[in-house]
Amino acid sequence: MTRAEQKEKRRAEILDAGLELFLRKGFAATKIQDIAQHVGMSVGLLFNYFDSKEVLYEELIRIGVSGPRSVIPTPNIKPIIYFETVTESLLDAVKTEPITAKMFVFMNQAMRNDSVSPDIRKLLNQMDNITPSIPLIRAGQKDKTIKDGDPYALSIAFWSSINGIAEMVALLPDAPCPEPGWVIDIIRRTN
């Protein structure tokens, strides 16, 4: 392993430790010493990777924000197919990649953190999956594949279900993950 690969591996370990500790203790209660101890390094060495706890936290948020960009609707896809594909993809990631479930929890906590910098607040505001889904739900209602009802409320129900499932899998890793079809049935027209 090259020196650059070792440094990147160590950086990833620090990010993993920070994520784990921020989830368990919260941002305010997590000390930089806790993170350093978790990865078995001195605080001084950790500062070679991240200038502060805040910089580490912000990097995790940047990583978390980049994930939802991959579920932005594709033009010319039937809305119900979009929701089915997104649900299958996200639930598969939640089941097979523990970091995905943890990131859902972390990002939800970060959204409620009033002490983040204005730059990070702007990043967090990009996390809105609910609003962009409303036109898709309307289109699905028009083509009779998505049930009638307030599109905003249906979008909230759908995305809250995904978030809730991810949180439960993060908290209870041995718990079974619901089937994607059960989540889709929240919005799918059945008659």
Image (cartoon, grey):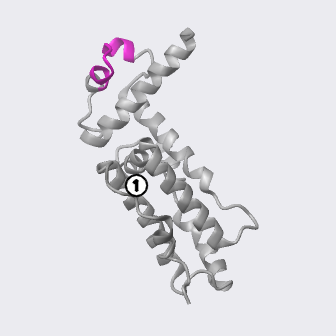
The quadrant in which the C terminus is found is bottom right
Q: How many marks?
A: 1
Residue at figure coordinates x 33%, y 36% from the top left: 20
Give the x, y percent position of residue 121: 46, 48
Residue at figure coordinates x 54%, y 85% from the top left: 190
Residue nearer the viewer, 93 or 103: 93
Residue at figure coordinates x 42%, y 50% from the top left: 104
Residue nearer the viewer, 67 or 59: 67
Q: Which residue is at the far top?
A: 3
Residue bearing mark 1: 166
Tag 1: amino acid? Ala
Give the x, y percent position of residue 165: 39, 59
Can you say whether 183 is above or below 120 in the image? Answer: below
Q: Secondary structure at mark 1?
A: helix
Q: Main secondary structure of the magenta part?
A: helix
Can you say whether 54 is above or below 83 in the image? Answer: above
Residue at figure coordinates x 58%, y 60% from the top left: 86
Give the x, y percent position of residue 100: 45, 46
Q: Is residue 106 left or right of residue 72?
A: left
Q: Which residue is at the far right?
A: 76
Give the x, y percent position of residue 79: 65, 72
Q: Is residue 107 visible?
A: yes
Residue nearer the viewer, 176 or 113: 176
Residues drawn in magenta: 35-46
Q: Is residue 169 left or right of residue 1?
A: left
Rendered image quadrant of residue 49: top left
Residue 139 falls inside the magenta stretch: no
The quadrant in which the N terminus is found is top right
Residue 45 falls inside the magenta stretch: yes
Label 1 Cα neighbours within 10 Å, binned few <14 / some 14-19 / many ≥20: many
